[in-house]
Image (spheres, rainbow, N blue to C red):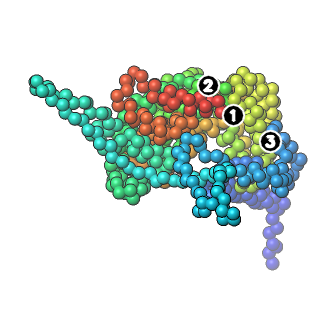
Amino acid sequence: MPKPVIPSANNASSEVDVLRRQVEALTAENEHLKLLVAKYRRLHFGQKAESQAQLGQLDLALAYEPLVIEVAGSAKPSPAADDPAVEKRSRKRKSFPETLPRETVTHTPDATCCPDCGGRFKPLGEDVSEMLEYVPASFKVIRHVRPKLACTQCDHIAQAEAPSRPIPRGIAGPALLAHMLVGKFCDHLPLYRQSAIYARSGVGLDRALLAEWVGHCHELLSPLTEAIRRYVLSGPKVHADDTPLPVLSPGKGRTRTARLWTYVRDDRPAGSADPPAVWFAYSEDRKGHHPREHLTSFRGVLQADAYAGFNALYETGGILEAACWAHVRRKFVDVYRASGSPIAAETIARIATLYGIEARIRGQMPEERRAVRQAEARPRLHALRDWLEAQNQRVSRKSGIADAIGYALNQWSALLRYTTDGRIEIDNNAAERALRSVALGRKNYLFGGSDVGGERAASMYCLIGSAKLNGIDPEAYLRTVLSTIAEHPINRIDELLPWNLYPAQAADLQKAA
């Protein structure tokens, strides 16, 4: 009878090692897939805010003693829920703006004399309360009449010149065009919805006609868009980002992904009195030569994410790279939400201290901001890097936390640059805020009709976004510009920039900032 083959100790050990490696690989892959699922769930269903309270860091059971962090100015005593002062404050209503028209309705008692004794009434005072009412928008037709006058002694005929129109021989006035543009590019109402709204008022304006009006406005306002581009790129620092824009692909029955690029000039957090502005550009794809073309004339600090298309700009030496700590934090937030990693939680807490420093110095002059960052933020950043490098040796190379740590360490020089220059911000949120209106509009109109439509959208987002950054009503601004730009000298186009056309509103916003 043959003897059974007993595996040797070496063979058994090798098989165990193989199985262990397979388990480790499968575990890493599982964590990676869980991270991807968490990201997609957050993008589609989750809240966008990434506050400390949402992360639930105080409830973490960490394997080691976590870093205790107190952000200056963040801890405030909460009043008691039954405090009458709190209840009174919560019930207080804001007064209506004084600019709103008032209509007074007086309610007098039905009786003209006292029902008890028959005596006459005399004024004793009055109680006044206000109620906000809505007057539906309406259309009106303006008839331009130009009488012809003939001379009684010769054949001379006199007549006033026809007033200019935003669209030659068009039926739309400046106010209607401004309302339509703000409805689509600020209030996110697609043109077909606006057409239906106008039809309820008895005015039939086809969607194709509205689209044609958008094209005419784009051509008319293009010199002003170019003026904003020059102003934005003449600053010492620019925030840059991009977002996808689905565009119809002719003849294929589907959409392709184009891009809208945003470039923001906003130095108010560094105490600058220069007005903020945003310029948008459209491209049919995301190739790196587009931002290089956009920023050909720019020299200064470019604050952006780690998109590889920007790398060629930094190689010239005329543009300095400043990275975004919000992008770094977001990667650790994704890891924490997917796996509850204590390393991710600790990193998020350390980054919170950096933002606490920024909150205290917002609006101060660049040299003051730089001094505080050098004294307080830079030592914390050096400690954070040492800690991340140590944790990087412990985690699996294929895990999500390793990707997050690697992203931060690879961008470290650019992430540290904000501590050396008080004009630079800690993150690129200025550009992301500018793209928020695009993201909201994209959910409603879904896609652009063509590349031409993308260029028109970029132009309108530029003008409306710059007006909003300066605290100016974009509809009032466009209404004024469309009324005057056709006859305005092209060499004085800067007079129509939002902060020049409405200097009082821009100054008020600057004081508030």
**Which residue type does callout 2 highlight?**
Ala
Q: Residue at x 81, y 65 (%)?
A: 7
Q: Estimate the x, y position of residue 312 in percent, counting from the top left.
A: 54, 29
Q: Position of residue 443 (x, y in %)?
A: 51, 53
Dot 1: element: loop
Which mark, residue 273?
A: 2
Q: SS class of the residue under badge 2? A: loop
Q: Is residue 144 shown to the viewer in this render?
A: yes
Q: Residue at x 51, y 30 (%)?
A: 502
One can see residue 335 in this view: no
Instruction: Identify which residue is drawn at 71% across, 36% down.
Output: 409
- Cα–Cα gap, marks 3 and 1: 18 Å
Q: Which mark is residue 149?
A: none
Q: With respect to residue 43, does 223 lie above or below?
A: above
Instruction: Find residue 426 and name its label.
Output: 1
Q: Residues within 10 Å of mark 3 (few under 14, many from 20)?
A: few
Kindly identify the amino acid type of the residue bearing the numbered disc 3: Ser
Question: Which mark sits nearer the N-terminus, 1 or 2?
Answer: 2
Is residue 30 toward the left or the right of residue 262 in the image?
right
**Could you tell me the amino acid type at mark 1?**
Ile
Is mark 2 in CB contact (under 8 Å) with mark 3? Answer: no
The residue labelled by disc 3 is 74
- For disc 1, the neighbor class at 10 Å (few under 14, some 14 to 19, many from 20) is many
Q: Position of residue 78 (x, y in %)?
A: 83, 49
**Mark 2 to mark 3 CA distance (whole Å):** 28 Å
Disc 3 is placed on an element classified as loop
- Cβ atoms under marks 3 and 1 closer than 8 Å: no
Q: Is residue 338 above or below residue 434?
A: below
